[in-house]
Image: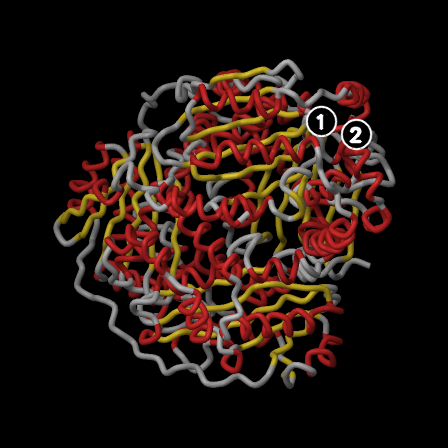
């Protein structure tokens, strides 16, 4: 087995020697708009992802940015919601948005031959969205109803509560999606004001498609009401304090418990170690052969899945574990995760498993370039984090030079047990067992909706 | 709207696929793509929930888990390590009709992965200790997918009622008593019946040398003997066995942990490839896909919404099919009255919603979806494998696209009237149900 792993490392270290993908990245300036274009002529379609350096952190109340994008096509002064949805659906235009605390992305995908009508209309809605009262009330009613039903997804509920609890005391604690209370504060005026801020925010267009997509320059500069006047202001967070309890969130008739363990990271913890932390997340919970899956699922049958993540924006990040277990083994699972964190931090890492993870991450590097959209997504994140794109190509080399000691150090820094917030969504009866690990504090899920 | 000047759906893609047929009945499809030094391998076994019998429900899916536990040549629990250790990823899924294993790997790993696949097809270990641990994992997966998921409960209940008494009425993941009692020997016997080269379609897409790939496939899989049980088992499953026996409409109220009622309503439609299925696919997209669809406009995007989401789809299985509408209601909406209104509205859509413009809209959307689906090696491999398995010919996509291109307003209207005049199964899950 070891021989196979070594051979693999040697073979994959030059995985991208065939072609330098950075050569395919063209950076341009269209007026105020920075443009990053990767030519992709496989099919006659384009994807235009507009990055706005503005996100939920600037919201007056929870869910404002999300609603501003979500309701963008609910009506202009010339067309109603039905007209707009008929228009975009006819062309098969796929409109998507995502809002994070630090930035937001609005994406448009359609056939290249429809680029002019589709993108002109997109510019129109950014210029003239009215957020009509009738459509807004309907949206609020639906959103609140959906949120009240979140209890049907224990995993979704656990994610939402974990964010709020683990980031408590920071501006990042508010849910991007909105709350039952905040939906009631939405008005056409406040949404138009928020859209105006997005129109003025620094923007970058991440574009893929064949050469025809260059006609977008004229369409955007002529029709979109955009400038790039405002930028994200740096935000310094204090390091998280120790966490001394397990938060148990009872839900009715749960025969499994959702487990979330983790903490937030501050900007001073991250620079220079992005790739180390990426490696750590993969080592701990990045596949079937990761430490957690092997220990929890393969060796003990405690869960169906376990994953670890270290996700980083510019000024903060989050690191944690996502898993679940049956009621009887929930406490055992948490105890085991604690032991794994501590063992790895103490350097109890076998060379075989370390080399295996190196092979996994170096060999898998090329897959990040297969879909142009995913490649552009990587570039967008690097740009947001103010990282040099050259680092991306150096990733295999960085991982190859990593040592077991550095992995242990990364675990020690990222997953210190006393700073980890633990949230369990499950049956109330778990309280007794969980107390053996930490004191338990009961939370009502309704308080987090 | 602008006149549509683009190519027809059928002209939109031309796939160049190399086909290899081995003497033992195995089919391999190969599409070289040198863009990056990676490839995807998909193994389509024609075995799924429909091949099981009472007492061993879930056997296909349980076996899917055990296939990762090791085979003779490479030993226990090494498969994941070899694949992931080289930078690859792997997973599998089981449906009513098929079990599919897939790997995405660097080009250098072609020979070893084909060797692993051949090894586990022929010499699966089914280690007793692993079998016992994996049973617990499968039971947890079942809880996650059904018992703890109102949407999972809804789908399971729908299939059990619509296809009551037929092989499609059984749970793919398995009934709990069966999962607890099924023995290693029963799974071994099931494995021997269905894991054979004459029950496999292999699809390889990516940076591979065609000649070398053909050689390795022939060398690894050629010596494996075919199983006479395969044809016998498939021939025993005649289409009539899968016809839903629904004479009158059924209404099922299932208690579950959903504060808002969620529902699915299904009608019997046609098996995959049936000429009438295409019009129903188009119908489902017109009435239930996108913000401009009738269901979303009539129930969701209205002043006082009755539903937070609505959708429709036509599901084509190998032996049968069903057309369904579903959604989540807003709290306070009366379920009975909603159902009556929905049934009436669906019939009225046959007159109001089937227009040339809406049919063109569907075609535009299908083209976008088609491109998205074929964007990766894995996407193309899955696209080809599904057609090879269902129709015994990957080229069938041309027929599918031609049929969609030809669909007319009259055909969709006729299909609409036909489907909505049939008995239906209406299932809802709600915490207020008793």
Chain of residue at mark 2: B
Question: Residue at coordinates 45% horizontally, 76% vertically from top-left?
Answer: A167
Under tag 2, what secondary structure?
loop
Q: Does the rendering let one see residue B424?
A: yes
- Residue A226, image x, y percentages: 20, 55
Dot 1 corresponds to which residue?
Answer: B320
Q: Residue furthest top?
A: B23
Quarter location, residue A422: bottom right
- Is residue A421 positioned above or below A358 on the image? below
Under tag 1, what secondary structure?
loop
Which of these two is toward me, B133 or A430? Answer: B133
- Is residue B177 positioned above or below A159 on the image? above
- Is residue B241 positioned above or below B126 on the image? above
Q: Does the rendering let one see residue A120?
A: no
Question: Residue at coordinates 49% horizontally, 71% vertically from top-left?
Answer: A347
Q: Is residue A31 left or right of residue B35?
A: left
Q: Is residue B405 left or right of residue A401?
A: right
Dot 2 corresponds to which residue?
Answer: B244
* Crowdedness near tag 1: few (<14), some (14–19) or many (≥20) residues, C-alpha within 10 Å: many
| Residue contact at pointers 2 and 1, CB within 8 angstroms | yes
């Amino acid at each position: 087995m070891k021989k196979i792993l070594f051979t693999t490392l040697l073979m994959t270290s030059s995985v991208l020697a065939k072609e330098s993908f950075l050569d395919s990245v063209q950076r341009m300036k269209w007026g105020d708009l920075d443009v990053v274009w990767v030519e992709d002529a496989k099919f006659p379609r384009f994807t235009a992802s507009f990055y706005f350096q503005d996100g939920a952190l600037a919201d007056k109340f929870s869910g404002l940015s999300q609603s501003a994008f979500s309701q963008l096509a609910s009506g202009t002064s010339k067309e109603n919601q039905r007209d707009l949805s008929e228009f975009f659906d006819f062309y098969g235009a796929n409109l998507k948005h995502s809002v994070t605390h630090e930035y937001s992305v609005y994406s448009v995908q359609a056939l290249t031959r429809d680029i002019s009508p589709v993108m002109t209309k997109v510019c129109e809605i950014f210029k003239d969205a009215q957020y009509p009262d009738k459509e807004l009330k309907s949206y609020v009613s639906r959103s609140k109803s959906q949120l009240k039903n979140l209890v049907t997804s224990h995993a979704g509920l656990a994610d939402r509560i974990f964010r709020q609890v683990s980031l408590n005391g920071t501006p990042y604690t508010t849910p991007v999606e909105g709350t039952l209370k905040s939906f009631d504060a939405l008005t056409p005026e406040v949404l138009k004001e928020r859209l105006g801020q997005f129109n003025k925010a620094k923007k970058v267009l991440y574009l893929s498609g064949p050469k025809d997509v260059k006609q977008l320059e004229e369409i955007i500069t002529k029709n979109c009401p955009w400038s790039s006047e405002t930028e994200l202001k740096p935000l310094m967070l204090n390091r998280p304090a120790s966490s001394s309890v397990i938060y148990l969130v009872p839900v009715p008739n749960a025969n499994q418990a959702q487990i979330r363990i983790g903490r937030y990271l501050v900007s001073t913890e991250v620079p220079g170690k992005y790739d180390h932390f990426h490696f750590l997340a993969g080592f701990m919970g990045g596949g079937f052969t990761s430490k957690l899956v092997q220990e929890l699922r393969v060796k003990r049958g405690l869960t169906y899945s376990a994953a670890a993540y270290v996700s980083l924006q510019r000024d903060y990040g989050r690191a944690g574990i996502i898993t679940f277990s049956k009621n009887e083994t929930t406490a055992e699972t948490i105890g085991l995760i604690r032991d794994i964190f501590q063992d790895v931090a103490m350097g109890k890492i076998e060379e075989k498993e370390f080399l295996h993870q190196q092979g996994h991450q170096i060999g898998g590097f090329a897959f990040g370039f297969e879909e142009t959209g995913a490649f552009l997504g990587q570039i967008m994140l690097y740009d947001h984090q103010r990282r040099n794109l050259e680092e991306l190509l150096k990733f295999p080399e960085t991982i190859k030079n990593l040592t077991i000691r550095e992995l242990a150090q990364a675990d020690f820094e990222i997953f210190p047990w006393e700073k980890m917030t633990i949230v369990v969504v499950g049956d109330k009866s778990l309280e007794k067992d969980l107390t053996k690990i930490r004191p338990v504090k009961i939370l009502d899920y309704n308080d987090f909706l | 709207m602008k006149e549509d000047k683009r190519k027809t759906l059928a002209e939109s893609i031309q796939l160049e696929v190399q086909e290899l047929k081995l003497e033992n009945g195995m089919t391999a499809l190969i599409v070289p793509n040198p863009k990056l030094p990676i490839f995807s391998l998909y193994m389509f076994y024609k075995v799924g929930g429909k091949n099981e019998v009472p007492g061993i429900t879930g056997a296909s899916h349980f076996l899917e888990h055990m296939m990762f536990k090791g085979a003779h040549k490479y030993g226990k629990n090494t498969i994941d390590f070899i694949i992931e250790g080289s930078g690859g990823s792997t997973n599998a899924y089981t449906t009513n009709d098929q079990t599919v294993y897939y790997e995405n790997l660097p080009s250098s790993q072609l020979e070893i992965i084909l060797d692993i696949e051949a090894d586990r097809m022929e010499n699966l270990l089914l280690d007793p200790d692993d079998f016992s641990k994996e049973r617990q994992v499968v039971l947890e997966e079942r809880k996650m997918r059904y018992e703890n998921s109102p949407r999972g409960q809804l789908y399971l209940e729908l299939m059990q009622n619509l296809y009551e008494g037929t092989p499609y009425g059984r749970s793919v993941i398995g009934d709990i008593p069966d999962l607890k009692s099924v023995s290693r020997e029963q799974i071994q016997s099931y494995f021997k019946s269905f894991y054979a080269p004459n029950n496999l379609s292999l699809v390889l897409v990516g940076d591979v040398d065609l000649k070398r790939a053909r050689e390795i496939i022939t060398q690894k899989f050629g010596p494996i003997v075919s199983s006479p049980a395969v044809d016998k088992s498939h021939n025993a499953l005649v289409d009539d066995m899968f016809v839903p026996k629904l004479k009158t409409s059924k209404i099922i109220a299932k208690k579950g942990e959903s504060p808002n009622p969620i529902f699915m309503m299904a009608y019997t439609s046609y098996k995959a490839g049936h000429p009438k299925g295409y019009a129903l696919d188009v119908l489902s997209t017109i009435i239930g896909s996108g913000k401009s669809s009738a269901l979303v406009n009539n129930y969701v995007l209205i002043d006082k919404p009755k539903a937070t989401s609505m959708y429709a789809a036509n599901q084509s299985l190998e032996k049968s099919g069903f057309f369904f509408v579903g959604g989540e209601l807003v709290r306070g909406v009366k379920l009975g009255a909603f159902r009556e209104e929905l049934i009436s509205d669906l019939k009225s859509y046959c007159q109001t919603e089937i227009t040339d413009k809406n049919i063109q809209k569907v075609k535009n959307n299908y083209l976008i979806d088609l491109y998205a689906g074929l964007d990766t090696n894995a996407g193309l491999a899955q696209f080809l494998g599904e057609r090879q398995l269902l129709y015994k010919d990957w080229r069938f996509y041309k027929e599918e696209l031609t049929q969609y291109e030809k669909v007319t307003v009259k055909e969709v209207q006729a299909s609409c009237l036909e489907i909505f005049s049939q008995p239906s199964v209406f299932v809802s899950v709600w915490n207020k149900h008793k």
